[in-house]
Structures are given as C-alpha cells and as structure tokens.
Image: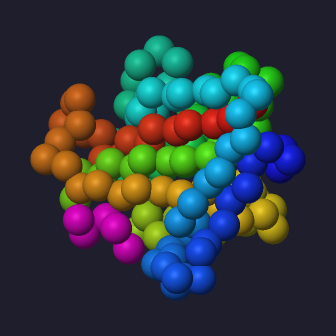
Amino acid sequence: MSDRIEIYNPKELGAPLGQYSHVTRVKSGGDMLYIAGMLAADPSGKIVGEADFDAQCTQVFANVEAALRSAGAGWNHVVQFTTYLVHSQDIPKFMVWRKARFPAMFGSRPYPPNTLLVVDRLVQEPFLVEVQTIAAL
C-alpha cells in the first residue's frame, strides 16, 4: 500500500459489517483513478455468467483489475468501491464471494470502504452486479 493511503476503522464506529473498512485517507500529491461501474461483460460486450452471480462477480472484479492495470495500478491502490446489486437476496452471496476472494486480492491489508446499494436494474436486464472503483496512484 502506498504511504499516501491509510485505510482504517475508527473505534467510535465499531467493526465493519463485512469485508470493508469505514474510512480511507489519501494524502494529496498524486493522481486519482475513477473507474466507471464495471459489469460482467467480456471485451466484445458479451455477458459473462448470465444468471450466475458468482461468475458475474468474478468477471466484474477481473474488469476492475484490468482497468487498474491500464493505469499501472493494482488492488493496493483502491480506496473505495461502490457496489450495485439487482437483488437483495444476492447480498449474502456477495459477502461469501468477497470473503473467499478478497484475501488473495488485498493480502493482509485492510479492505477499502464499500458502499452497497440494491437497485431496480442495471443497464441490461441480465446483469446482476456492478462495481464502481476509486483508486489513488
């Protein structure tokens, strides 16, 4: 993790309810990377994992990683996620997916803050999850 990025949980807020932290502090002096919401689509725009939540999460985060790499960044640069789910029933699936995958992505460092929203739908009906990302370079 960059010495410009500090991710933490103020004791006054208690422990987070999942694989995220409450606060990221970024010291000024570097570039910020704002990544649009990534969907479960391959480079040709084809939906990956239609009706398969885990497959869609895997593709979404692969797309986030590709966007990070395009700027010479990695998971250690991520300072915030905003996650959009179409079905509230998928919240437990998302928590299980993150618990299984985040340790490999982030190592032992704290996980970035994540706002989780349930929305009516995404840009196309088959998409189940979308993740917007902010990174500090």
Q: Position of 68 compared to 10: left or right?
A: right
Q: Residue at x 34, y 67 (%)?
A: 91
Q: Residue furthest left?
A: 120
- Nearer to us in this view, 41 or 130: 130
Residue 57, position in %: x, y? 48, 50
Residue 70, position in %: x, y? 71, 20
Residue 78, position in %: x, y? 65, 44
Q: Position of 17 compared to 104: left or right?
A: left
Range of the magenta residues? 88-92
Q: Is residue 33 above or below residue 106?
A: above
Q: Is residue 15 above or below residue 86?
A: below
- Nearer to us in this view, 58 or 105: 105
The reply to whether residue 49 is in sight is no
Q: Position of 127 compared to 120: left or right?
A: right
Q: Residue at x 52, y 28 (%)?
A: 35
- Nearer to us in this view, 121 or 10: 10
Q: Residue furthest top?
A: 44
Type of colouring: rainbow
Query: Would residue 91 be counted in the magenta stretch?
Result: yes
Question: Overall secondary structure of the magenta stretch?
Answer: helix
The reply to whether residue 25 is in sight is yes
Q: Residue at x 86, y 47 (%)?
A: 3
Query: Would residue 85 be counted in the magenta stretch?
Result: no
